[in-house]
Amino acid sequence: MSDADAPLRSFRPFMRFWVGRLAGTMANQMLMVAVGWQMYELTGSAWDLGLVGLYQFAPALLLVLVAGQAADRHERRRILALCMAVQVAIALTLLAAAQGGWASRGLLLGLSVAIGLAKAFQMPAQQAIVPLLVPPEVLPRALAFSSAGMQAAIIGGPALGGFIFAAGTAVVYAVCALLFAVAVWLFAGVRHAPVPPSTEPASLATMLAGVRFIRGRPAVLGAISLDLFAVLLGGATALLPIFAKDILHVGPWGLGLLRAAPAVGALAMSIGLSRWPITRRVGRRMFGAVAVYGLATLAFGVSTQFWLSMTALAVAGAADMVSVVIRQSLVQLETPNEMRGRVSAVNAIFIGASNQLGEFESGATAAWLGPVGSVVLGGAGCLLVAGLWMKLFPDLARRERLLSPS
């Protein structure tokens, strides 16, 4: 049996990493549910809830060059274990504050910054370690399977956190600390073939090497920028409360289902891709997936039926997953190992910026055109970007296989 046909469970270092990532993602999702609830109980301010997210994103933006450099100069498994250990400490601090009654707005915002610092270093190392754990021909399946676990954690984490919340905030934080500790143990035990350490002296030039690499590789630049502009224009998540209340008239329960629908579609697609990976006509299929994402966004924007809106969001999530798996596989396979940390750090910022700025774009255009006009314009813009990028990056559009001939 060739590596390409071998079951993923036979790659034990990857499976150990996968379970660790699942535990860490589940814990982080639960932690954010608890922090958000506790912040709102303390202040009753929607602004403060927004600050929790902003304070987590800011360190990733500020430390992108440093984090990428670290992932290329040090063992990535140790970086991941250290990041999880920091989050164990954060969860235990929140546990002590909940039990002692000394939780405050300042403490929650300060710990949000600490979470952001840990995730700033976690994300590049997490993306860059996967190609070391499986052969190149297995990478697309591994990324799809990894995405399936992440989507399951995104769906199940908040639900589990809400269920445990009935026993008290402290219990949620205790479970989070336990899950983070499990992730520390799993990441620390990941083994892979030795990689020679970088001999380049640390400097601003080496930190910026990831940016220069992306600019000089049309396939990588096209894939990363396609994600940035497609999600920036096509996202409708920020407007879901308006659709649930004023257009579909389904209330809070419907809002919860609408928010879960894209993740359900993405989970189903990622499971399929881990079993039947895309191996041919990858360029056209990636652009086709972006176009389907735009069409599904358009359908959601004009829908007044709850079932149709749910279906459109699920289709959008599934199409986005096809694009994500192809795009991430291309980026990782086109990037040499000694550059993967810095390139992954830039990629993570593009993803974070597209999500954050996408929510702002949706809100701004909704204030001008209304929620339906905003979503319809975003879907049309996504289709325009897909067509334009096919013209700007013709080699990427014609790309036949993930692995280049060289």
Image (spheres, rainbow, N blue to C red):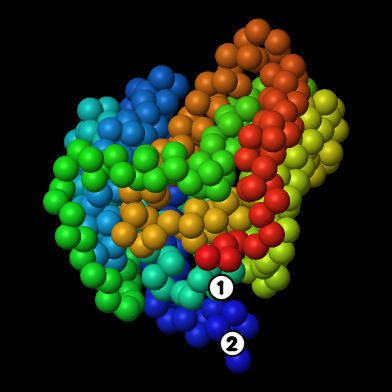
Quadrant occupied by the N terminus: bottom right
Residue 289 percent location from the top left of the image: 72, 47
Q: Identify the residue position indicated by label 1 in the image.
A: 137
User: Mark 2 is on which residue type?
Assistant: Ser
Residue extending furthest toward the top: 368
| N-terminal label among 2 and 1 | 2
Q: In the displayed structure, does residue 89 sit left or right of residue 361? A: left
Q: Is residue 240 visible?
A: no
Residue 67 percent location from the top left of the image: 27, 46
Q: In the displayed structure, does residue 319 sit left or right of residue 116? A: right
Q: Identify the residue position indicated by label 2 in the image.
A: 2
Please identify the quarter of the rendering in which residue 66 is found.
Answer: top left
Q: Residue at x 42, y 26 (%)?
A: 50
Residue 235 percent location from the top left of the image: 63, 32
Q: Residue at x 17, y 60 (%)?
A: 199
Asked if 167 appears above or below 238 in the picture, the reply is below
User: Circle 2 sits in a helix, a strand or a loop, which is it?
Assistant: loop
Residue 231 percent location from the top left of the image: 60, 35
Please identify the quarter of the rendering in which residue 177 is found.
Answer: bottom left
Q: Residue at x 59, y 87 (%)?
A: 2
Q: Which mark is residue 257?
A: none
User: Mark 1 is on which residue type?
Assistant: Glu
